[in-house]
Image (cartoon, rainbow, N blue to C red):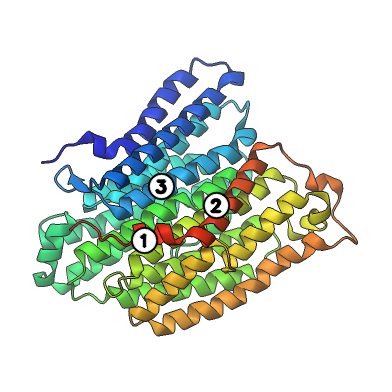
Amino acid sequence: MNQNLTALLPELLLLGAAVVGLVTGSWLPRRRQWIVAALVAAACTAGLTATAVTMATGREQTVFSSAFAVDTATDIGRLIVLTALLLIVGMSVETVRDHRNETEYWVLLSLSGAGTLAMTGADDLLMLFAGYLLASLPAYALAAFARDARGTEAALKYYLMGALLGTTMLAGTALLYGAGHTTGYGALSKALPGAPYGPVAVGLVGVLAGLLFKIGAVPAHFWVPDVTDGAPTPVAAYVTTLPKIGALIAAYRLLHQAFADSDVNWPLLVAVVAAATMTLGNLAAFFQTSVKRLLAYSTISQVGYLLMAVAVATRSELAQRGLLFYLAAYTVTHLGAFAVLTELPRARSLADYRGLARSRPGLAAVLVVCLLGLVGTPPTGVFLGKLEVFSASVDGGQTWLAALAVANTVASLFYYLRWLGPLFVTTGAAPAAAHAVRGRAAAVTACTAAVLSLALGIGGQALLTLADDPLLP
């Protein structure tokens, strides 16, 4: 059994930062608790360095009885998650500064990030469920961090749905173990084709139910708008990005590795879920006036596009690289939009953004890049990501799904323009108080995310080449 702990260095760094930060924060005065944030940021930076070294040396391996795989998907997932964590730390600094639970905020963020990384590399059903729990439990607490009525309600809905679908996921794991007598993906791929169809099908649906909850896809999407609207803005940015990264890569790995030869028609199931998710997300976003709820439904629609790559995981060689690149582009673009919301805490509705291009031209420019990027406008990274995913869908025989996705992309332009249009209106502009900024950290984060989105669009071929390497068997 390979017990190489250095293969888990990024995960261990986040866990270590959480433990050390919790102990250190209990002794620090309130005005010095920013040190814990610096510790988490340092752990993310060290994790990025360790991942870069692993990718450069090509040290792909499975560790701890093949429960965790360190391969291309894991490494790129680590790069995305750790970069996203750094951006979220940047936009959170001024929001939680001098809060009486500031240390706990950074600790919970670090623990949930470690759980997301565990899901990314999970090559065993039990490892997958452990990562699910570690990513979920801190997130429930973060959703209620503001301790107000809306946040408490959002956290309760988040927890109840997570507990229900987590139990469903565990029941699905038990069924698959009963059918295949193992929980490792490699062994399941050999055992499931000869197992009874019923337990395999029901078990797969149960496991996917838990992953769809983390992803925020139909029919497990109901928590997304309420949590996004009720939680503090940096937490809303977190719950609409990080869990999706881990769960989407985990779903891809599970279906690609364990169910490639199964008789269950999971490609059709995932394709139908993708179609329903992108369509519902776009339709629900059309007439939203709250910017946070609009972005919540926008992220549901983006999940629909991302699931297209999962639907053709075993049918197209473009699926893996399309999924990984789209995840990277979506993450930085989406976080850029949320960083603008964090910087403008009093601008809660579309009307509050009237005249922003005149009063805050830098923030308006970032918002234009990010919102048009979410549509899939060149030269942003999401454009290249959508092109790869749509091509993979056609290559995998899901042409109807690609056509629906194109139609949804065109339709999504409507509600993004409803937000962008008022930016350049000079008559009847919003009160100056609506454009009051929180500080500089969120603004710097927003600009950084916008630059990364453009950089992925212009120089994305390098990442696409890296993402081509196959998963470990």
What amino acid is at disc 2? Answer: Leu
What percent of the width, then of the height, locates residue 34?
Answer: 56, 25
Q: Which residue is mark 2?
A: 452
Q: Quadrant of the C terminus?
A: bottom left
Q: Are marks 3 and 1 in contact (CB under 8 Å)?
A: no
Query: Front-most of 394 and 460?
Result: 460
Q: Are marks 2 and 3 in contact (CB under 8 Å)?
A: no
* Real-space Cα separation, disc 3 to disc 1, in angstroms: 15 Å
Q: Nearer the viewer, mark 2 or mark 1?
A: 1
Above-or-below relation of 283 to 237: below
Q: Quadrant of the N terminus?
A: top left
Q: Which residue is mark 3?
A: 79
Mark 2 / mark 1, whichever is N-terminal: 2
Q: Disc 2 on helix, strand or loop?
A: helix
Q: Which residue lies at the image location 77% right of the left edge and 56% below the top edge?
A: 353
Residue count near mark 1 (Cα–Cα under 10 Å), binned few <14, some 14–19, many ≥20: few
What percent of the width, then of the height, locates residue 458?
Answer: 53, 61
